[in-house]
Amino acid sequence: MKQRMLAILLVLLTVILTACGEEETEPFTIGVIPAQTEGSMEGAMDKLQTTLTEALDREVSVEVYPDYNGVVEAMNYDNINMAYFGPLTYVVAHEKSGAKAIITQLIDGEPFYYSYVITHTDNPWNSMEDLLDNSSDVDFAFGDPNSTSGSLIPSIELQDRGVYTSEDEHAFNSVRYTGSHDATALAVQNQQVDAGAIDSAIYNQLVESGKIDGDQLKIIWESDQLFQYPWAVHKDTDQETIEKLQEAFLAIEDEEIWDAFGATGFTTATDADYESIKEAAIRQGIIEE
């Protein structure tokens, strides 16, 4: 009987140790919103994956998702350990699953950016007022529906000015969603739309890199400053892992990684930094108060 009990205990111990080993070797998974089209981010994501694998001493897998909401749902269903969110998608993920902001990006030393509305230089409009004087002739573009600077903030501005309620109810000739900031910039540059909303940091990076021609575009509206995009971890992430991730991001000096996010560095972040975005999301009925 004793030998049988010992055999059972040994089997149980083997199962437990095997499970622990498997848990330790599972990849640390990171989901990334498509702030730019996926192809333009691929090389940077490979470098980031290598950097974080070394920092955590554990395999890291970084995946750019096809849309913003997919990253929120991946966190909500425990399919990822960490995510690169827009401010709006972060507050939604925090509300749904308790995601916790730990890192954000810097632009020239500051963790802020803006929403821009841009138009082609051939157009006569030099301000939002000029544009809206002719709203019935304007084809307008937002980015992803869940983007902060590409949708939430400019839609509130247009709503306050009485020209926009929804994609189907507005004073424009047409409204479309391009899916990403660089797609919006190219649509405006190629005169497929008359004006579009875009992240200021990504716009500036696209101009500096030559991916769009700044001489063909002009900024006609700028929002109040917005706190930058957060990197957030799953609510169950231990403090040691959080600290390793923060140290790794703060040490990054690779310009290809920075450029993928329109950044010039990284700094720490907390949930409190996104209070103004939370208030905007409540106002629009995206999350509950």
Image (cartoon, helix red, strand yellow):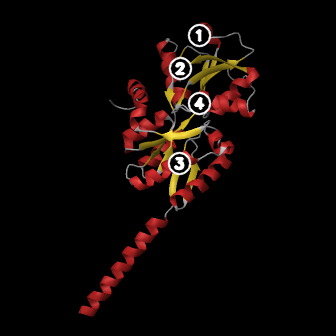
The residue at which mark 2 appears reads as 223
The residue at which mark 1 appears reads as 132
- Dividing the picture into quarters, in which one does residue 14 lie? bottom left
Above or below, 125 relative to 63: above
Determine whether the residue tagged by mark 1 lies in a helix, strand or loop.
Answer: helix
Determine whether the residue tagged by mark 4 lies in a helix, strand or loop.
Answer: loop
- Dividing the picture into quarters, in which one does residue 40 lie? top right
The reply to whether residue 75 is in sight is: yes
Name the quadrant of the N terminus: bottom left
Whether the residues at callouts 3 and 4 have beta carbons within 8 Å, the answer is no
The residue at which mark 3 appears reads as 31
Between the C-alphas of marks 1 and 3, the distance is 37 Å
Whether the residues at callouts 3 and 2 have beta carbons within 8 Å, the answer is no
Above or below, 153 relative to 130: below
Which of label 3 and label 4 is nearer to you?
3
Q: Position of residue 220 (x, y in %)?
A: 63, 15
Question: Residue shown at 42%/26% (left/top)?
Answer: 276
Q: Earlier in the sequence, mark 4 or mark 2?
A: 4
Amino acid carrying mark 4 in the image: Gly
Above or below, 45 relative to 214: below
Q: Earlier in the sequence, mark 3 or mark 4?
A: 3
Which of label 3 and label 2 is nearer to you?
2
Amino acid carrying mark 2 in the image: Ser
Q: Position of residue 73 (x, y in %)?
A: 46, 45
Whether the residues at callouts 4 and 2 have beta carbons within 8 Å, the answer is no
Question: Residue shown at 67%/28% (left/top)?
Answer: 185
Between the C-alphas of marks 3 and 2, the distance is 28 Å
- Dividing the picture into quarters, in which one does residue 278 lie? top left
Between the C-alphas of marks 4 and 2, the distance is 16 Å
In the visual, does 253 lie left or right of 275?
right
Which of label 4 and label 2 is nearer to you?
2
Determine whether the residue tagged by mark 3 lies in a helix, strand or loop.
Answer: strand
